[in-house]
Amino acid sequence: MTGIKSDRFKAVILSFSALIVYSSSMTAFGYIFDERLYCRLASALVTGLLGCLYLKTVLKEPAVYEPPDRRFLIASGVTIFIFVIASTFTTNVFLHMFTDGSNSTESLSVGMTLLSIFMSVVIAPFAEEVIFRGFMCKQLSVFGQTNAIILSSVIFALWHGTAVHLYTAYFGGLILACIYSKTKKLRYSIFAHMLFNGMTLLVNAIINAYWRFDMLVVCVVAATMNILLAIAIVKLFALQGTIPLQNDRIKARIKDDEETSRIVAEVLNERKQRR
């Protein structure tokens, strides 16, 4: 019993380690850069690259799963699309309720705008998936997969730090953690995160440029899309993302790896003898 508690304690510590590295690097880069965007960019790159290195070496898992089921990937894409629309309209409702209705943002130069978009669509999804899914969700799975998904999503939402993000980051975290947990591959949740952020920026740009909705219409669309989102998430969780490889296929892969190692060893031996 003591051993189980010790393993769980270690898992909790490890699950927060990448987030600690990110926070520490933000503080360190704050002494170097005056612009917060540069701090976020540098911290995300450092945390993401170090995290990926760690996941690929120390925490490397054997390839014992089939590629993800196509139906699950399609369902994931549909869920993300519904979530983009739902979150866009729900955010507008929140802004109208808790602010004066204006969504004023600081005017940025073209270069800073492009860098901000690159940060939002590429770097942030990469680093956040390493932190919250690669580390946190994976390690917290010692408490059960469902608990790990919920806990990592709650922390993901709180980490974003705004009332609006309590909604968007929580449900987004649920979807992304589900994708990671069911595919067993971080690359799919990274791509899904990039897709969500990119589509959100595009939809918001189109709405702000061309559409003006009455608030009643916005509320109706938000409510409808959130109902569809709840249905889509339930269905996504019910689907099987991937299945374990059959024993004969695992043995075949191991045999192939052993054969490759043998051939490499023979070639290196032969080169050594020639010298």
Image (spheres, rainbow, N blue to C red):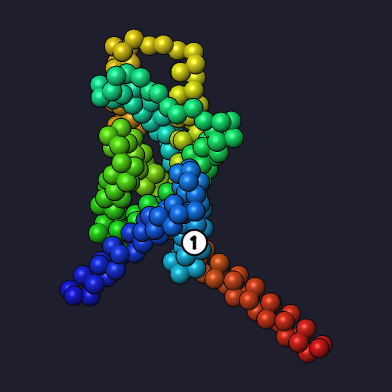
Residue at image x 44%, y 52%? 30
The quadrant where residue 27 appears: bottom left
Q: Where is residue 253 in the image (x, y as percent from the top left)?
A: 56, 67
* Displayed quadrant of residue 225: top left
Q: Which residue corresponds to mark 1?
A: 50
Quadrant where the C terminus sits is bottom right
Does residue 154 show up? yes
Q: In this view, does 196 lie above or below 208?
A: below
Most foreground residue, 228 or 124: 124
Q: In which quarter of the image is the N terminus?
A: bottom left
Q: Residue at x 48, y 46 (%)?
A: 34
- The amino acid at mark 1 is Leu
Neighbour class for label 1 at 10 Å: few (<14), some, many (≥20)?
Answer: some
Outermost right residue: 274
Q: Is residue 127 visible?
A: no
Side of 136 where 5 appears, left or right: left
